[in-house]
Amino acid sequence: MKKLYLLLVLFVVTLTSCTKEVIVPVGDDVYTWMQTHDKGTVAYVDYYTGNYIVETFRGFSVVEPLDGIAPHENDLEYAYFGSRGAQSTYNYTGDYFTSINVVATRLSWSEAIYLIDQLSY
């Protein structure tokens, strides 16, 4: 019986520690979001796949949209473009939030174009 209670407690702790909360600011908190995230300009968009390249002060990042919303070229976006993986981004030009996956960071222009071509196939 003690083993059952122990397993139940471990199971509950595991489930509660695996919850994910998406933090999207509302109203005035957008400016806090912009101050705490990297600023990037959309340099190229592959409108067929939706993948795009963002230029930051660290170089270029290749991004895949997770919700199917692709920005336009020259849009300003705020996210952690220096970190790979899934995250939220704020498009300042369009005033909306989207979910993205940063595939690669700190690339040169030719490396970013090559990677966009590889992701298309």
Image (cartoon, helix red, strand yellow):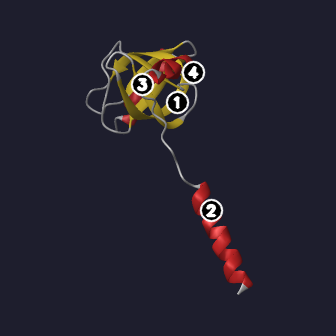
Q: CA distance from mark 2 to mark 1?
A: 31 Å
Q: Residue beneath label 2, please?
A: 14
Report the residue at 52% width, 48% height from top: 20
Decide: few, some or many residues near mark 1? Use Cα within 10 Å; few <14, some 14-19, many ≥20: many
Q: Position of residue 54 (x, y in %)?
A: 44, 19
Decide: few, some or many residues near mark 4? Use Cα within 10 Å; few <14, some 14-19, many ≥20: few
Tag 2, which secondary structure? helix
Q: CA distance from mark 4 to mark 2?
A: 30 Å
One can see residue 52 in this view: yes
- Callout in the foreground (2, 1): 2
Of marks 3 and 1, which one's residue comes earlier in the chain? 3
Which mark identifies residue 37? Answer: none
Q: Position of residue 15 (x, y in %)?
A: 58, 62
Depicted 16 relative to depicted 5: above or below = above
Of marks 4 and 3, which one's residue comes earlier in the chain? 4
Depicted 63 relative to depicted 28: above or below = below
Decide: few, some or many residues near mark 2? Use Cα within 10 Å; few <14, some 14-19, many ≥20: few
Q: Is the Cβ of the residue at disc 2 closer than 8 Å to that at disc 3?
A: no
Which residue ends up furthest to the right in the rendered image?
2
Task: Give amino acid for label 3.
Answer: Tyr
Task: Give amino acid for label 4.
Answer: Thr
* Image quadrant occupied by the C terminus: top left
Task: Give amino acid for label 2.
Answer: Thr
Tag 3, which secondary structure? strand
Q: Residue beneath label 3, please?
A: 90
In which quarter of the view is residue 42 placed?
top left
Report the residue at 74% width, 83% height from top: 2
One can see residue 113 in this view: no
Which of 31 and 99 lies nearest the eye of the viewer? Answer: 31
Of marks 4 and 1, which one's residue comes earlier in the chain? 4
Q: Residue beneath label 1, please?
A: 104
- Callout in the foreground (3, 1): 3
